[in-house]
Image (cartoon, rainbow, N blue to C red):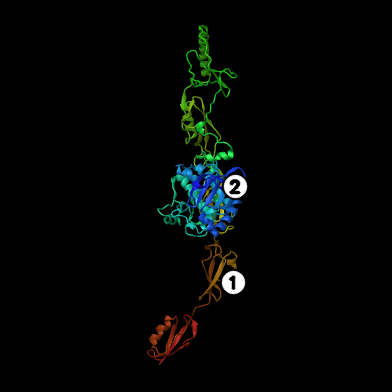
């Protein structure tokens, strides 16, 4: 790229005359130019000549320029035209004379909470507008936030970052550092990005504007990129009331991050709650090249003189050059005279000499005395001799304390209409006029604006939400949610909110900013009792009907029972009358009749051994047929037969 000074005076596209350099970067020079067709000033950004040979870049650059040129939003820098020249591709942009946020920060300026909230709202609104039209900036940083002469901000360089990203051209080593300071974690990892990447970058820009530092910055570009992956925004005391919204806008996971519209809404709510911001201390451009379009060059401030004549006051004018006021000479200020007098805006200065007459001195003395008396009377009437005091600092005091401070110096305290504040408690002085230190006479009025406390915000409907969902909805409305002990509710599903309240107000529609809403979730249907009407004369089906009548279900189990007939209910688990969760299952144990035993095989055993075996199986040995000490040859009933437990068995032996 040629030296930037070599291009001054050239005309690009037979229309844009380059007047002076505005700045330079690794990939482009920026010039103040005259649009000779429309007779207006524009900014022309001339990109590197190396880009002119990159067909992919030129195609993308043209498409992005056309898309950005269609944007029409008060906080997006207008793109008027684009083209190619021997020096490379160029963009024709709206010219702004207020400098950039980078300029402010480099001068050591730190934004107040109000200034940051208002600035962030405007930038986020511009981003939301562009995102809704499918455009992602990809390079939000202080240098791309430009101001007009009235302090309104514009987002610059939409589309350029994406076109450069797809170009074969490589910037010099280290040129990415400025971008890497504000890049989103997903961009650092090379993942696809959407508008939430711009929101992340804007959050870091506001963090720097408030604190003077950029979070996650390491010694190297790679270290800077790696430091933010998976890391939440570090807290900083300078963030104040913007701490929460910036943390949400810079969430490491894009899915948990605010989008631009949501960011603008939350910053806007903060801006309306905070005191009105002071104007930004912009360093307005004073380029000599402005003359061709304006037709003249206004002299600098140092060359201008302003004379203000206050009613009832006399302005002393210096003697004309080469003239000395001697004894008996005075300078008269008489309108309408032209005889040798110097005239300036209705004030004529004469150097006529008055003659020395004793009578004149007497008359003059009398006039002086009368003037002094009259002046004294006027001074008394206007309080010239009334004591004065510096205005005390009452901001931050209670109204009672402010009144005491005003009374001490005999000022009259005027309490104006209150204003909402998210940082100053209700009843505390939010602002005062005049400001502290200004000297006023006793009896003067000191006006204060008391805080009304946090402003009221709308409480969203939380119907059909869980506690977690309700807490998120409340956070988006600048409120907090607290889940309290769940309660049974026969009509509300388990986990879903039954009600929400602010103090004694149920389901409020409005609440003070930042207040906590109590959330009552449902535990589901209240417990039910296992029916006591199920008896041992019922079958399983009888029991099931009674269980289903109270929305319980049943499962069948079996057991033998000597006293309960086969097929009848023996017991329930849980037992009758027990409270169980709604819809739970009760085990119904059904009788299979008296217990039975299979006669074991004891042939070949001694009679004594067979007796023990039969008894262990629940049978009774009725007697022995044969040798009582012999070997068993059989039993009655025979082995393998099923008999009631406790039945008698006869041992056959030899």
Q: Earlier in the sequence, mark 1 or mark 2?
A: 2
For this orientation, the residue located farthest to the bottom is 654
Q: Which mark is residue 541?
A: 1
Q: Residues within 10 Å of mark 2 (few under 14, many from 20)?
A: some
Q: Nearer the viewer, residue 392 or 329?
A: 329
Q: Where is residue 640 in the image (x, y as percent from the top left)?
A: 48, 86
How far apart are the two marked residues, 1 and 2, measured between alpha carbons?
96 Å
Q: How crowded is mark 1: few (under 14 residues within 10 Å), some or many (20 or more)?
A: some
Q: Which mark is residue 15?
A: 2
Residue 4 seen in render: yes
Q: Which residue is drawn at 50% across and 10% down?
A: 365
Q: Residue 489 carries which label?
A: none
Q: Which of 54 and 93 is in front in this view?
A: 54
Which part of the image, by quadrant, shows the C terminus? Answer: bottom left
Q: Which of 624 and 275 is in front in this view?
A: 275
Q: Position of residue 267 (x, y in %)?
A: 53, 46
Q: Which of 507 and 273 is in front in this view?
A: 273
Give above or below for 81 relative to 588: above
Asked if residue 219 lies left or right of residue 195, the reply is left
Q: Position of residue 638 (x, y in %)?
A: 47, 88
């Amino acid at each position: 790229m040629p030296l930037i000074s070599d291009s001054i005076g050239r005309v690009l596209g037979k229309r844009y005359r380059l007047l002076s350099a505005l700045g330079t970067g690794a990939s482009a020079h920026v010039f103040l130019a005259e649009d000779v067709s429309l007779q207006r000033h524009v900014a022309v950004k001339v990109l590197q000549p190396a880009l002119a040979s990159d067909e992919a870049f030129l195609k993308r650059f043209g498409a992005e320029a056309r898309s950005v040129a269609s944007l029409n939003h008060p906080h997006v820098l207008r793109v008027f035209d684009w083209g190619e020249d021997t020096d490379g591709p160029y963009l024709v942009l709206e010219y702004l004379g207020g400098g950039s946020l980078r300029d402010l920060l480099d001068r050591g300026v730190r934004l107040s909470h109000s200034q940051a909230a208002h600035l962030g709202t405007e930038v986020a609104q511009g981003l939301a507008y562009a995102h809704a039209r499918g455009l992602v900036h990809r390079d939000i940083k202080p240098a791309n936030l430009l101001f007009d002469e009235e302090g309104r901000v514009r987002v610059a360089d939409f589309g350029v970052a994406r076109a450069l990203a797809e170009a074969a051209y490589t910037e010099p080593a280290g040129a990415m550092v400025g971008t890497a300071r504000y890049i989103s974690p997903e961009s650092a990892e090379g993942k696809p990005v959407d508008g939430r990447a711009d929101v992340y970058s804007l959050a870091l820009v506001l963090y720097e504007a408030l604190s003077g530092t950029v979070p996650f910055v390491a010694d190297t570009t790679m270290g800077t990129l790696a430091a933010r992956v998976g890391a939440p925004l570090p807290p900083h005391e300078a963030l104040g009331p913007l701490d929460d919204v910036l943390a949400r806008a810079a969430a490491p996971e894009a899915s948990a991050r605010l989008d631009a519209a949501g960011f603008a809404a939350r910053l806007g709510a903060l801006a309306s709650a905070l005191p009105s911001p002071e104007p930004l201390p912009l360093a307005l451009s004073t380029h000599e090249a402005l003359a061709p379009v304006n037709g003249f060059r206004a002299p600098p401030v140092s060359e201008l003189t302003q004379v203000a004549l206050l009613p009832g006051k006399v302005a002393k004018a210096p003697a004309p050059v080469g003239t000395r006021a001697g004894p008996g000479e005075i300078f008269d200020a008489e309108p309408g005279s032209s005889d040798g007098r110097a005239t300036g805006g209705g004030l004529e200065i004469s150097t006529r000499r008055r003659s020395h007459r004793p009578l004149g001195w007497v008359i003059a003395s009398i006039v002086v005395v009368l003037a002094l008396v009259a002046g004294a009377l006027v001074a008394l009437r206007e309080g010239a001799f009334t004591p004065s005091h510096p205005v005390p600092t009452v901001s931050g005091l209670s109204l009672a304390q402010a009144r005491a401070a005003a009374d001490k110096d005999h000022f009259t305290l005027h309490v104006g209409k209150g204003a909402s504040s998210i940082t100053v408690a209700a009843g505390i002085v939010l602002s005062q006029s005049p400001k502290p230190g200004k000297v006023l006479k006793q009896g003067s009025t000191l006006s204060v604006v008391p805080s009304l406390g946090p402003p009221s915000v709308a409480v969203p409907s939380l119907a059909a939400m869980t506690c977690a969902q309700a807490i998120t909805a409340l956070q988006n409305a600048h409120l907090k949610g607290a889940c309290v002990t769940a309660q049974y509710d026969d009509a509300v599903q388990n986990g879903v909110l039954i009600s929400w309240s602010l103090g004694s107000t149920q389901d409020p529609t409005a609440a003070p900013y930042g207040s906590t809403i109590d959330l009552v979730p449902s535990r589901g249907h209240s417990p039910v009792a296992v029916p006591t009407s199920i008896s041992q004369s019922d079958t399983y089906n009888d029991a099931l009907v009674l269980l289903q009548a109270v929305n319980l279900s049943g499962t069948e189990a079996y057991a033998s029972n000597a006293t309960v007939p086969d097929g009848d209910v023996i017991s329930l688990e849980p037992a009758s009358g027990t409270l169980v969760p709604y819809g739970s299952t009760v085990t119904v144990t059904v009788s299979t009749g008296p217990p039975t035993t299979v006669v074991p095989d004891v042939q070949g055993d001694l009679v004594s051994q067979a007796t023990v075996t039969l008894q262990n199986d629940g049978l009774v040995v009725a007697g022995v047929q044969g040798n009582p000490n012999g070997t068993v040859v059989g039993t009655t009933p025979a082995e393998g037969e099923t008999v009631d437990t406790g039945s008698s068995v006869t041992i056959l032996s030899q």
